[in-house]
Image: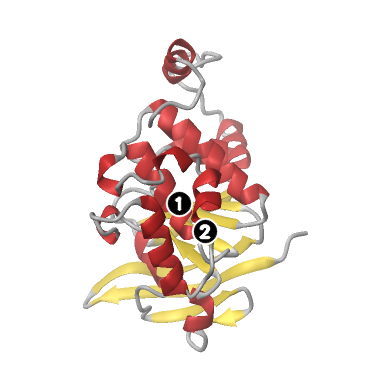
């Protein structure tokens, strides 16, 4: 059985009288892809930002790789990677320069081309971030999370706005990162994405966890209640058709 790498116990976050997170508890196993699912405003991003040390909690306990968030936040920062948003990149620098810049902030020595190879962007090494497509930007953003060789990476809706090919390419990248031993925490609004990627998911609504289990088990539990889709489920989806017709190979996404 894999060891627990993140423990969240009775976590609360309040903004005045508003409770964004209402006493949630869960754990994440080392080496798994763990998903936080829920509608906008459910508390997913707030929970992630607290674990990432980017936002303070109101109460509760968080342990990351055996370290108490209240006592050792700087040590926790050293073992995690957090996906940056577009605003986090200097527009005048190319990808190699950006990676070297962030490596300096981490006080890490890196081979930027090796990192770009991991995300299939070596051919864009001299390109500026703003010159790339949405899928390429997301892959580069994930590359920056790997600079400090983290034990855990956090990805907040990494495929939002991408076309089907770009999404599936990013799925493969996330699987490869997990296969290297890194634990992945992901939020997404795409249920097919969570079903493909996640070993377990926690479904959050109105600041509370209402279910936590593997996607397969949650689906089996629903079917056991007698639930049936109103439309017959086909063996393929329209997205599968799109991928088949336009090609499986990696495009300039």
The local crowd at label 2, few if under 14, some if 14 to 19, many if 20 or more residues have their Cα within 10 Å, is many
Q: Is residue 35 left or right of 19 when viewed as pictured?
A: right
Residue 37, horizontal then vertical, whole percent: 43, 49
37 above or below 243? below
Residue 162, horizontal then vertical, whole percent: 35, 34
Q: Residue furthest front?
A: 126
Q: Residue at left 36%, top 58%? A: 84
* Label at residue 142: 1
Quarter of the image for the C terminus: give it.
top left
Please tell me which residue lies in front, 249 or 21: 249
Q: Is residue 47 visible?
A: no
Q: Secondary structure at mark 2?
A: loop
* Label at residue 190: none
220 above or below 112? above
Q: Are marks 2 and 1 in contact (CB under 8 Å)?
A: yes
Q: Secondary structure at mark 1?
A: helix
Residue 140, horizontal then vertical, whole percent: 41, 48
Q: CA distance from mark 2 to mark 1?
A: 7 Å
Please tell me which residue lies in front, 2 or 40: 2
* Residue 137 location, quadrant: top left
Residue bearing mark 2: 146
The local crowd at label 1, few if under 14, some if 14 to 19, many if 20 or more residues have their Cα within 10 Å, is many
């Amino acid at each position: 059985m894999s060891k627990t790498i993140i423990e969240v116990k009775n976590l609360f976050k309040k903004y005045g009288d508003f409770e964004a997170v209402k006493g949630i508890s869960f754990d994440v196993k080392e080496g798994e892809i763990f998903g936080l699912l829920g509608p906008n405003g459910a508390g997913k991003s707030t929970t992630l930002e607290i674990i990432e040390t980017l936002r303070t909690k109101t109460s509760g306990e968080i342990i990351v790789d055996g370290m108490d968030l209240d006592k050792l936040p700087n040590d926790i920062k050293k073992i995690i990677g957090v996906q940056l948003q577009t605003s986090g990149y200097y527009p005048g620098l190319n990808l190699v320069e950006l990676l070297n810049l962030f490596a300096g902030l981490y006080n890490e020595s890196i081979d930027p081309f090796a990192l770009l190879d991991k995300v299939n962007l070596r051919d864009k090494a001299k390109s500026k971030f703003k010159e790339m497509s949405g899928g390429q930007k997301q892959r580069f953003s994930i590359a920056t999370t790997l600079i400090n060789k983290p034990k855990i990476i956090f990805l907040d809706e990494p495929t939002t706005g991408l076309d089907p090919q770009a999404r599936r390419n990013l799925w493969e990248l996330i699987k490869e990162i997990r296969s290297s031993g890194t634990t992945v925490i992901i939020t997404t609004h795409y249920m097919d994405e969570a079903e493909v990627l996640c070993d377990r998911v926690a479904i959050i609504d109105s600041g509370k966890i209402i279910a936590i289990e593997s996607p397969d088990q949650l689906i089996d539990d629903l079917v056991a209640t007698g639930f049936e889709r109103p439309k017959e489920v086909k063996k393929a989806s329209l997205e599968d058709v799109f991928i088949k017709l336009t090609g499986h190979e990696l495009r300039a996404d």
